[in-house]
Amino acid sequence: MTSYENLPLYLMNVKVFVKMGLIDSSGWIKRFLYGLILIISFVGQMINVSKTWSEDIGDTSMNFYCLLLVIHCLIRFSIVVKKAEKFERFFQCIKQWYTDIECKGDPQMVGILQEITRKTQKLSKATIYVAGLATICAFLYPLLFDERKHIIAVQYLFFDALQTPFYELFYLMQVVLVIPAFLALYLPFTNIFLVSLMFGELVLKDLCVKLRNIRSENEETMLQEFKECLEYHRKVIDLCDDIQDFYSMDGFFHITFFGMMLCMLLFFLSMIHDLRLLLAALSFVSFTTYMLFITYYYANNLATESLEVANAAYDTPWYRGNLEMRKCVITMIARCQKPLQMTAGGIYPMTMETFQAILRVSYSYFSLLQGLNQQ
């Protein structure tokens, strides 16, 4: 068992990745089978979307949204597999950092760490409930229709996936393999990102406490303590760079395609009258909006807290220090002028302002589509 697998901060999320072989160098067979499931589902959905593109707009919208979800899972799968070793080093670093704060940290920070751990564990447990509920809903969804439907609509070139025995086979495979595989990648990946952002905010608070605790009358002692804080700040920056490296491309896909899909789903909701499709579309809209909101909320908190470090550095008794001490303070304040901001693809800053802009743009396109439809 890896040393970071049972880290309380991440609860079962990292363990899921390890058990599935995604970040375990010895689990290449599991990785291959996992990727095969995703690729087979993706190919089947692509063929289905291309064949049903000109049919009912409701089914087309739902199929296209499911296709984007599968593409999103493929992107996350490729990120984790490609950066598996870096993920392992990242979790090892978090494990060591967590232990240091827990054993040697300021009592105030230990309390905050315990509070964040409880919050992340509730988040992880909520994920388990969501996964279970989603699996039940996915299982029941095709049964609500008179005609045959798959949980994830797929078609293939050499046989009809809606004919016996292929229909029963694919239905069983989707219930037992495909849906659990999607949920076991999608939800833990999201949780790991959110928990990492929360931990980044925590260590920034810890840095501010360390800076404000510099009160020594001895110039050399004060300088040494401040240099340690400078090094600590560099470590925090490296942590945020790693988070950015892991999630930048994923965030770009999220903002680009799901922002567009939010508009399409709103348009779809305004047109349909079938209660089953209405509930499905409403759940997708709620899920997309929630995922965007919570991600940008915690990323925004991290950026805001990083700016507070400059105030903490200025609050030190630098005026009692020597020239080198004052240069160090200037260096840290200058370094803090640029917030530690997550970006989607290195382009869009992940802030609450961007989240509001996504909602405004989606609603604007929704209004445009409604106007064109009425004409």
Image (tube, rainbow, N blue to C red):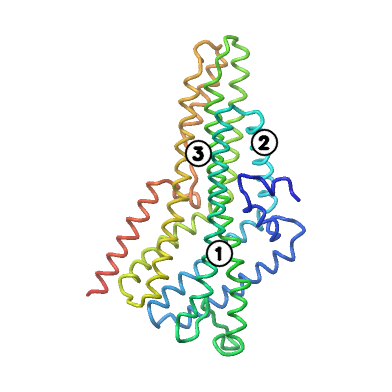
**Badge 2 or badge 1: first in the primary sequence:** 2
Number of residues whose C-alpha sits closer than 10 Å to that of mark 2, classed few (under 14), some (14–19) or many (20 or more): few
Name the amino acid, label 1.
Gly
Q: Could you tell me which secondary element the residue under label 3 belongs to?
A: loop
**Could you say which quadrant of the image residue 182 lies in?**
bottom right
Q: Which mark is residue 99?
A: 2
Q: CA distance from mark 1 to mark 3?
A: 35 Å
Instruction: Look at discs 2 and 1 and give the one toward the viewer.
Output: 1
Instruction: Give neighbour class at mark 1: few <14, some 14-19, many 20+ (Cα, 10 Å).
Output: some
Q: Position of residue 346 (x, y in %)?
A: 50, 49
- The foreground one among 112 and 79 is 112
Secondary structure beneath dot 1 equals helix
Contact flag, marks 2 and 3 (Cβ < 8 Å): no
Nearer to us: label 1 or label 3? 1
Q: Image height check: is 147 above or below 177?
A: below
- Which image quarter: residue 235? top right
Q: Which residue is mark 1?
A: 132
Give residue 183's mark.
none
Residue at 50% from the left image edge and 18% from the top image edge = 316
56 vs 181, left or right, is left
Q: Please give the residue where the numbered disc 3 appears in the rendered image.
A: 340
Question: What residue is shown at x 40% (from left), y 82% (from top)?
Answer: 54
**Amino acid type shown at disc 2:** Thr
